[in-house]
């Protein structure tokens, strides 16, 4: 029987084996999910951009563009930041989970997997995402409180106003403390398709943030990017 709670959720299945796609599609639709499918990474990226699926089941070994590259491409799109990505890999494949998580994956599922177990994993991922979204209106870390609804920031209880781009950069960095964001990621996630002139653009915004917040929050990783840290 279909679960009505799942009926609005769309899952994109990406695998180069049509038989596996059909098995996954059958079991997901039987459980009440809507499905899309792609047999390669490029089609997966295009479908993700068009339909904004709630979750993507992504095979690692794909022709032309492999799963890691596909995941990185999807994650570089600001509109798809909320999409859950779970890698599917065969037990015999020489693949590092770390590489998948570094590419932006949320989970790592080993094939073959029983349909009921897969559905359970998917339900858990969607529930966890929903809870995170409900709790993500404010972020607090090491004396800084960021309110996404009010577009405001306070440092040790002192409220301040930040220009839009500075707020977005801080929001991005503080969302994953200790994670290094490259300049390219910051450009893509903060500026999107806007034209940005020169690497100095980000440096200037970071300098202004440090002047307002203090030097102890945002650190430069030379030749790579920036990290929000203790």
Image: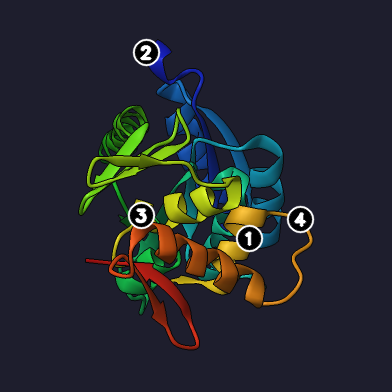
Task: Tell us which disc is closer to us: 4 or 1.
Answer: 4
User: Separation of disc 3 and disc 1 at Cα?
Assistant: 17 Å
Q: Mark 3 points at which residue?
A: 174
Q: Which of marks 3 and 1 is in front?
A: 3
Looking at the image, residue 7 lies above or below residue 126: above
Sequence order check, earlier mark of 3 and 1: 3
Mark 2 to mark 3: distance in Å? 42 Å
Any mark on residue 51, and which? none
Quadrant where the image shows the C terminus: bottom left
Q: Which sits earlier in the primary sequence, circle 4 or circle 2?
A: 2
Q: Mark 4: few, some, or many residues within 10 Å (few <14, many ≥20)? A: few
Point 65% across, 77% down: residue = 199
Q: Name the residue under label 4.
A: 194
Mark 3 lies on a secondary structure that is helix
Q: Give percent across and percent down for residue 210.
A: 41, 65
Q: How far apart are marks 1 and 2 (CA)?
A: 42 Å
Q: In this view, does 218 lie above or below 59?
A: below
What residue is pinned by disc 1? 188
User: For the residue carrying disc 2, how many other residues have a C-alpha within 10 Å: few (<14), some (14-19), or many (20+)?
Assistant: few
To which residue does mark 2 refer?
1
Is residue 2 visible to us here? no
Q: CB atoms at circles 2 and 3 under 8 Å apart? A: no
Question: Mark 1 falls on what kind of element?
Answer: helix
Q: Residue furthest bottom?
A: 223
């Amino acid at each position: 029987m279909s679960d009505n709670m799942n009926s609005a959720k769309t899952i994109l299945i990406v695998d180069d084996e049509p038989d596996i796609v059909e098995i996954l599609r059958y079991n997901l639709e039987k459980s009440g999910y809507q499905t899309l499918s792609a047999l390669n990474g490029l089609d997966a990226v295009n479908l993700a951009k068009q339909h904004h699926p709630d979750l993507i089941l992504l095979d690692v070994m794909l022709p032309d563009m492999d799963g890691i590259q596909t995941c990185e491409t999807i994650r570089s799109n600001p509109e798809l930041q909320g999409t859950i990505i779970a890698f599917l890999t065969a037990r015999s494949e020489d693949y590092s989970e770390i590489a998948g998580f570094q590419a932006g994956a949320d989970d790592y599922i080993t094939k073959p997997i029983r349909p009921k177990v897969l559905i359970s994993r998917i339900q858990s991922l969607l529930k966890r995402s929903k809870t995170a979204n409900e709790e993500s209106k404010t972020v607090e870390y090491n004396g800084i409180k960021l309110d996404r609804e009010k577009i405001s920031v306070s440092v040790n209880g002192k409220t301040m106003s930040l220009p839009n781009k500075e707020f977005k950069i801080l929001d991005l960095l503080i969302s994953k403390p200790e994670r290094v964001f490259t300049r390219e990621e910051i450009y893509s996630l903060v500026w999107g398709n806007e034209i940005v002139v020169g690497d100095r653009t980000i440096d200037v915004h970071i300098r202004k943030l440090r002047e307002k917040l203090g030097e102890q929050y945002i650190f430069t990783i030379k030749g790579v990017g920036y990290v929000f840290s203790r």
